[in-house]
């Protein structure tokens, strides 16, 4: 890292007017780049982790992603409350070591036979950085209804499409947020999956305190109104929701209580979950520790509560102040008021996956190759997992094919004719047929990415086929606020202050650039001494 | 600073549910705050500087400003290119030492007789942080046309008005950007006066490179198109425009050239100015040094060029890529293409000033008080400077009154009956009658703020009247890029590397919190080693 940065500074001569020969990535493989081109869809834990590990001396790397950066998601909640600055958890894709190609946009379609990806280019300044949720769909009452859920998000009629050729393709485009078709969630809830989401949450939380701080005026908010606006609702009791609640609580206690002391009696935080227990990945003792800790901090946890509708409050209260009304099944007709609802539950398949899985593939890429003298074989498709909608892979992370008859039979895994060559799937959009229950976590995505890249470095397709992927569980950590966390793995379990040290330390050493390894602890120190950043802009 | 932050952390008990007695600022002076309430309009160099110096043990301080923070403007250009993180040049108003009241919003009107300010409250998350430019007005062909320029910016019909009482009032609401009525500037130019402006410029510059980096596609940009999009036009050759051009050049050379080498031959930067010479506050030798330095870096400086119109380019080039066309008087009918136009020339009076100056004041506050046995005196108004539209003050920064006849005579300064008691004006919206040519700079605003606060600390109105304000010129610094700057004062002049050290050092020691004094050098170091932040979000 360091030499790269330093050497860059030694050449201080500007080349504005000197002519540089064109070295762009062209569709045709040019003579000076005889390396195989590996195109990666996505820049998250899977895509970025893969590109980071793949050897640029052996492969030409090209990333296609709507985001020009990787987000270190475990610290996203910290940025949403101002403990860390947003940029300290981002790694720009173009700053990867070695030569890297990057095209900002969405993969719209893939021609597996000609090995060409159709990309909707979008580098406009207002694009990206925000969680995209597809428009409403009927509730998934039946699994076959999955197809109805995959309309692409509404976009401008003007699209700039470009074609990108690949030799090998790594599909790592992740999953979308799942709203379960609940009315109003897509429009009014805040998500917490990208840096733009964190920025909007931060603005909203701080703005709510500011809005409630005015003295009596023409449009005076009553204490009851303020109590609603200062109710922070989190839906989903997984690690993301719990950590956000904890960080939000720290922000309010440490930074906002001294500035808005009068408002403190009106503040409340609630975590809602449909399950009987939050943090399902922790054992009962650790989850109870977390709940006891939350109870001491007056963070309410309401399990077995079902959100049924989210809407803006009536009149100016909703229109100007953005006050929300939550309808909860267990609370009857009485709606709960809130100033913000943070949605941290559920993911669904990326619409691209359904589109790809619906395509009939010709013979190209089929293994073994078809015999022209025989009758036309059954149409081939990517094999899709009916439960999650992801693409099924074999133990080597290669995309599996589903053989269907021309009349449209069902995709029986056992009858599958094999794999689609040169196409690999990792991360949230992959379902391994030998381990179909691997969780959709950063840990799994990261390990798959590293494994696949190392195998390709070791010997291309043969290298991949030489060693199956095996997941190693490093355990799970969740921050609980007040410098406490819980950690669980097969080997040990930690709680309290020790877990906090492990948590912060572990995050620092993994996946971060030197730049951010320097900046993150500095911000932790500065925020601890001087308080979090509370300016809104 | 440190003790404040540290002590804050010692009280870790949360008070969510405990009842705190109401301590809000009420309209009526409550018994437990017998201090005089000083209300400050604005949170810039004048307003924030004043509040920072005024003793909270002697006065109750209340700031009213559309921005919840102070911006350290000399480093704004650095944040717009990613050398510094935005938040490192912000100081939250609510974090001022000692008790401070803050209401986010615009002062809409002031009742000087009843000493009440009518405030349009606005703490919505999307508000503020962006330069507001009033809607078009006819060109100021005649000074009496000033009144036509002061329509308030268009706002929602829904306004939340609150009344704030004051004992003493400090008007420090600054000036607006002046577009001279040139078509399209208000809609299409970027300003660089607030942190939101810097953020938008940063997004736009980086997005332009990304947009030009795609391979040939359906909507392929030709090299001529890219040459237009990668033309960065700066209008105004004052320190702000010159420094932005220099910082932009550093960004492109240091950070973007390695990532987009093919685009470098297409990049150009131009500074336009109507005057025959840029940097008018520097003597000829230093200005020439700056021009020679720019010439070596291929930054074009076009003096005596008059921008006549700014518009979006036709078709998708303008609509999708935001390409601009600049019509320049000296270039005839041929328009110049640009990807961004940064407007850094001209300020105009805040519309509030004209509104206040148009008000007839009753006898209250008049000095000497009127004699009821005499005929009704002529109507009183705030005295307004006809050239700049600012409020005239005496040598003590007190607002001057203009006596006009009931039939509407002219405001002759010599005939003015005196001052409006308890109303002070500092910064860009003040014009001192004894020194009417003081420049509208941070230096003047900052010195006026400190002077006034210290005099009030020393003895209230009598303290103010005891010592007139005197401006001390600390000289002017302008950064030229490549770690070079020029500095000029009466005593000395500096150029080159030495000036750069002085420049960076001087900025650090003034007006910044400890937090930012720590963070700014860290960012300078980190950006120097690892490059600037180039992620867009």
Image (tube, coloured by chain):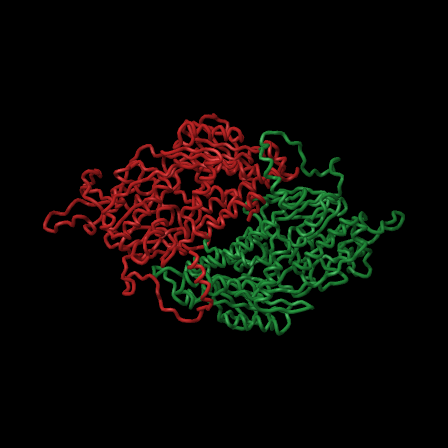
Chain colours: A green, B red
Query: A123 or A526: nearer the eye?
Result: A526
Among all residues in the image, which is located at the extreme right?
A: A373
| B88 horizontally vs A96: left or right | left
Residue A94, position as x, y percentages in the image: 63, 44
Point out the residue furthest to the left here. B373
Position of B362 relative to A239 (above/below): above
Residue situated in front as seen by the camera: B100 or A62: B100
**In the image: residue B463, left or right of residue A277:** left
Asked if residue B147 is positioned above or below residue B275 in the image, the reply reads below
Q: Is residue A5 above or below residue A409?
A: above
Percent across and percent down for residue A154 are 59, 51
Q: Is residue A86 above or below residue A284?
A: above
User: Looking at the picture, how far across and down is residue A212, in whole percent?
Assistant: 41, 61
Q: Quadrant of residue B358?
A: top left
Residue B166 seen in render: yes
Q: Where does the image place residue A439, in percent across and percent down from the top left?
A: 68, 63
Residue B70 as seen in the image, left or right of residue A139: left
Labels in figure, total: 0
Please tell me which residue lies in front, B465 or B71: B465
Q: Residue at x 64, y 31 (%)?
A: A20
Q: Is residue A180 visible?
A: no
């Amino acid at each position: 890292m360091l030499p790269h940065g330093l050497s860059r500074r030694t050449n201080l001569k500007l080349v504005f007017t000197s002519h540089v020969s064109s070295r762009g990535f062209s569709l045709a493989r040019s003579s000076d780049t005889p390396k195989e081109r590996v195109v990666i869809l996505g820049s998250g834990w899977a895509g970025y982790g893969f590109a980071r590990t793949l050897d640029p001396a052996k492969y030409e790397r090209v990333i296609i992603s709507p985001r020009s950066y990787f987000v270190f998601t475990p610290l996203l909640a910290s940025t949403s409350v101002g403990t860390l600055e947003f940029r300290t958890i981002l790694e720009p894709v173009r700053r990867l070591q070695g030569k890297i190609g990057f095209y900002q946009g969405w993969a719209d379609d893939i021609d597996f036979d000609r090995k060409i990806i159709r990309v909707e280019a979008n580098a406009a300044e207002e694009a990206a950085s925000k969680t995209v949720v597809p428009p409403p769909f009927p509730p998934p009452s039946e699994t076959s209804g999955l197809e109805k859920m995959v309309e692409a998000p509404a976009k401008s009629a003007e699209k700039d499409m470009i074609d990108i050729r690949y030799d090998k393709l790594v599909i790592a485009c992740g999953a979308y947020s799942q709203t379960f078709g609940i009315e109003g969630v897509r429009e009014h809830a805040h998500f917490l999956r990208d840096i733009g989401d964190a920025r909007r949450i931060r603005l909203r939380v701080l703005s709510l305190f500011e809005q409630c701080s005015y003295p009596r005026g023409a449009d005076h908010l009553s204490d009851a109104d303020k109590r609603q606006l200062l109710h922070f609702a989190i839906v989903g009791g997984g690690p993301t929701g719990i950590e956000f609640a904890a960080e939000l609580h720290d922000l309010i206690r440490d930074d906002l209580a001294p500035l808005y002391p009068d408002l403190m009696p009106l503040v409340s935080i609630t975590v809602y979950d449909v399950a009987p227990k939050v943090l399902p990945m922790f054992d009962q003792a650790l989850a109870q520790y977390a709940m006891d800790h939350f109870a001491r901090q007056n963070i309410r946890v309401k399990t077995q509560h079902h959100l049924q509708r989210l809407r803006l409050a009536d009149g100016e209260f909703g229109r100007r102040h953005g006050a929300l009304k939550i309808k909860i099944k267990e609370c009857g007709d009485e709606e709960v008021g809130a100033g913000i609802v943070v949605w941290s539950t559920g993911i669904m398949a990326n619409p691209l996956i359904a589109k790809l899985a619906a395509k009939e593939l010709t013979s190209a890429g089929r293994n073994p190759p078809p015999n022209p003298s025989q009758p036309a074989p059954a149409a081939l498709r990517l094999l899709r997992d009916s439960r999650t909608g992801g693409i099924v892979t074999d133990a080597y992370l290669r995309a599996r094919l589903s053989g269907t008859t021309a009349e449209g039979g069902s995709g029986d895994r056992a009858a599958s004719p094999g794999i689609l060559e040169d196409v690999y799937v990792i991360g949230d959009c992959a379902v391994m047929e030998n381990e179909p229950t691997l969780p959709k976590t950063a840990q799994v995505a990261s390990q798959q990415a590293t494994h696949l890249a190392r195998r390709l470095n070791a010997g291309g397709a043969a290298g991949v086929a030489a060693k199956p992927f095996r997941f190693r569980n490093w355990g799970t950590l969740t921050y609980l606020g007040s410098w406490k966390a819980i950690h669980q793995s097969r080997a040990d379990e930690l709680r309290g202050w020790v877990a906090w040290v492990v948590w912060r330390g572990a995050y620092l050493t993994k996946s971060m650039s030197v730049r951010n390894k320097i900046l993150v602890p500095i911000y932790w120190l500065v925020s601890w001494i001087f308080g979090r950043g509370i300016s809104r802009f």
